[in-house]
């Protein structure tokens, strides 16, 4: 018997990563796809697959690059609190811009060695082995990761009751919603348990809870802050950004987490200069022009007291030297409709079928997170929230009967929507409207039917969702209170001009607080 070399011996003991299917399996696939291949063609595919499997085997053997873990930590412990999922105490550098500040990390963001649930039993039990890029940046600047904040089930709700760990209560009234899906981040800021927080935003999920909890939350320009190491909903609307109690702290956190991520995130534009946002916020607004978008103040869900309060609050900026006037952007009325096909079908293809990462983008895929999603969706799809089940059923129906026609048209119309906002922003430095049309909604009870539950889940996003589609920076700041509850004012700016958005927010904050 001829002797084998070392490689041949090693190959004898390899466990195949892809099993060679039976011919009948390939015939069943061919039939399901209506390809009508001949027996000869199926046999050729079977034989050719042997070589393809060798390539997959080799890909599996090569060690892939990992996101770095630079600082030691212990896993912490499961928290017995409505707004915390997991508590920990991960310390970074001894000095830096965030030295000593406690930061809550939304539980769709990976922190190495700390369990991650993404609000869902689908992912429960998963512990990432890597830090998301923004987590590393916070630690590099001396921040302390205090824990993972509760988020909604797979981050797919504007309310704060779908998380598998239970509802997050509004800090001003525990029978009301804190808003979602970054519910825990905003609630903990309002309760002053943390100094800063990270949120995520695909339809308003930073700004909604910021509005209902009376805090500050910024959805940055699409691509300004890297999404690397964060569970995805749909890659064209994925945003992550800073949340804080004050504009200055929000600006400081943005300053730390913004910037190019070495090509790991294709949403980003290289060589974008990151200014010192925290130093620029006090520059004032003298000479700036502010447009109040009529369509953002008047639609059927809009409560009169909210429209009145936000208009009055925005008008106060004239006292700081700004010009404030009405403007009309008619297509804003269609913004939510334009967002819907991309959000529904994209969520299904990216988060559910794409297992939390999706396909067709060049960058860093967190493969262990992808595997955890895949196992969860394969073994317990029934554990999805009803809101997500609704999206899955609708998206599968649309996909089967209309393919990707409406997803494609949604993205084409997003260009039209973007140009309309850009045109308005040629005349105005920022645009303002209420963040949400209503004050905090009640947490649902067993008396609520499914119609009411879905209303409570999605009815608040008409003003927020369009800017996830277009990618413009949008910040929510507390405009004041009505009936004892906070009301958010949303400030929208030109792409990559977060500095002006923050200046306007800071100027209003000073007026509001009498400084």
Image (cartoon, rainbow, N blue to C red):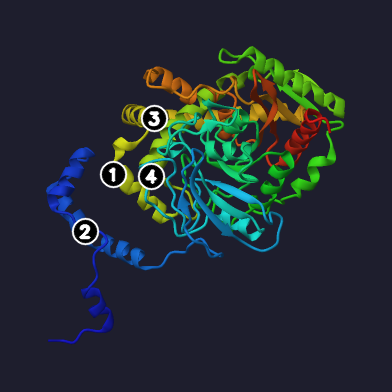
Indicate the secondary structure of the residue bearing disc 4: loop
Tell me which corner region of the image, top left, top right, bottom left or bottom right, holds residue 478: top right
Cα–Cα gap, marks 2 and 4: 21 Å
In the image, residue 18 lies at what x, y percent?
Answer: 25, 59
In the image, residue 351 lies at what x, y percent?
Answer: 41, 41
Name the residue rendered at 58%, 40% in the picture.
188
Residue occupied by mark 1: 378
Residue occupied by mark 3: 391
- Mark 2 or 3: in front is 3
Question: Disc 1 vs disc 2: Cβ atoms closer than 8 Å?
Answer: no
In the image, residue 349 lies at what x, y percent?
Answer: 39, 39
Residue occupied by mark 2: 19
In the image, 124: left or right of 197?
A: left
Cα–Cα gap, marks 3 and 1: 17 Å
Question: Disc 3 vs disc 4: Cβ atoms closer than 8 Å?
Answer: no
Dot 2 or dot 4, earlier in sequence: 2
Q: Which numbered circle lies on residue 354?
A: 4
Cα–Cα gap, marks 2 and 3: 33 Å
Name the residue rendered at 39%, 29% in the picture.
391
Dot 1 or dot 2, earlier in sequence: 2
Dot 1 or dot 4, earlier in sequence: 4
Tell me which corner region of the image, top left, top right, bottom left or bottom right, holds residue 19: bottom left
């Amino acid at each position: 018997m001829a002797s084998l070399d070392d490689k041949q011996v090693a190959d004898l003991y390899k466990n195949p990563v892809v099993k060679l299917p039976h011919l009948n399996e390939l015939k069943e696939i061919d039939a399901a796809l209506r390809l009508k291949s001949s027996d000869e063609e199926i046999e050729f595919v079977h034989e050719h697959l042997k070589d393809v499997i060798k390539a997959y085997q080799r890909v599996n053997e090569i060690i892939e690059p990992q996101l770095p873990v630079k600082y030691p930590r212990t896993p912490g412990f499961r928290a017995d609190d409505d707004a915390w999922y997991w508590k920990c105490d991960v310390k970074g550098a001894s000095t830096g811009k965030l030295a000593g500040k406690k930061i809550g990390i939304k539980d769709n963001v990976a922190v190495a060695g700390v369990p991650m649930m993404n609000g869902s039993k689908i992912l429960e039990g998963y512990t990432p082995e890597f830090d998301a890029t923004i987590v590393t940046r916070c630690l590099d600047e001396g921040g302390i990761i205090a824990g993972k904040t509760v988020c909604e089930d797979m981050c797919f709700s504007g309310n704060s009751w779908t998380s598998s760990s239970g509802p997050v209560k509004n800090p001003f009234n525990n029978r009301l919603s804190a808003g979602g899906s970054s519910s825990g981040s905003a609630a903990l800021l309002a309760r002053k348990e943390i100094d800063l927080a990270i949120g995520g935003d695909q339809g308003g999920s930073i700004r909604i809870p910021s509005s209902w909890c009376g805090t500050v939350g910024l959805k940055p320009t699409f691509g300004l802050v890297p999404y690397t190491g964060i569970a995805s909903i749909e890659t064209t609307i994925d945003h992550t950004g800073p949340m804080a109690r004050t504009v200055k702290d929000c600006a400081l956190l943005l300053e730390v987490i913004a910037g190019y991520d070495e090509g790991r995130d294709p949403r980003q534009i290289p060589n974008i200069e990151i200014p010192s946002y925290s130093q620029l916020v006090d520059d004032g607004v003298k000479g700036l022009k502010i447009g109040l978008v009529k369509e953002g103040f008047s639609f059927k869900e809009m409560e009169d007291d909210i429209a009145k309060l936000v208009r009055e609050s925005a008008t106060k900026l004239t006292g700081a030297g700004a010009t404030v006037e009405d403007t009309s952007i008619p297509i804003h009325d269609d913004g939510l409709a334009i967002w819907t096909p991309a959000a529904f079908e994209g969520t299904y293809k990216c988060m559910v079928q794409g297992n939390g990462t999706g396909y067709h983008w060049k960058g860093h895929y967190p493969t262990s997170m992808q595997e955890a999603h895949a196992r969860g969706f394969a073994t317990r799809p029934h554990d999805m929230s009803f809101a997500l089940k609704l999206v899955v059923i609708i998206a599968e129906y649309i996909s089967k009967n209309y393919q990707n026609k409406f997803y494609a048209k949604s993205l084409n119309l997003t260009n039209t929507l973007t140009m309309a906002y850009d045109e308005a922003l040629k005349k105005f430095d920022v645009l303002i409207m209420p963040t949400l049309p209503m004050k905090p909604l009640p947490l649902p009870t067993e008396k609520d039917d499914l119609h009411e539950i879905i209303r409570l889940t999605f009815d608040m996003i008409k003003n927020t969702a369009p800017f996830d589609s277009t990618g413009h920076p949008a910040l929510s700041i507390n405009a004041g209170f009505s009936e004892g509850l906070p009301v958010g004012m949303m400030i929208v700016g030109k792409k990559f001009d977060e500095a002006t958005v923050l200046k306007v927010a800071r100027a209003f904050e000073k007026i509001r607080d009498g400084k």
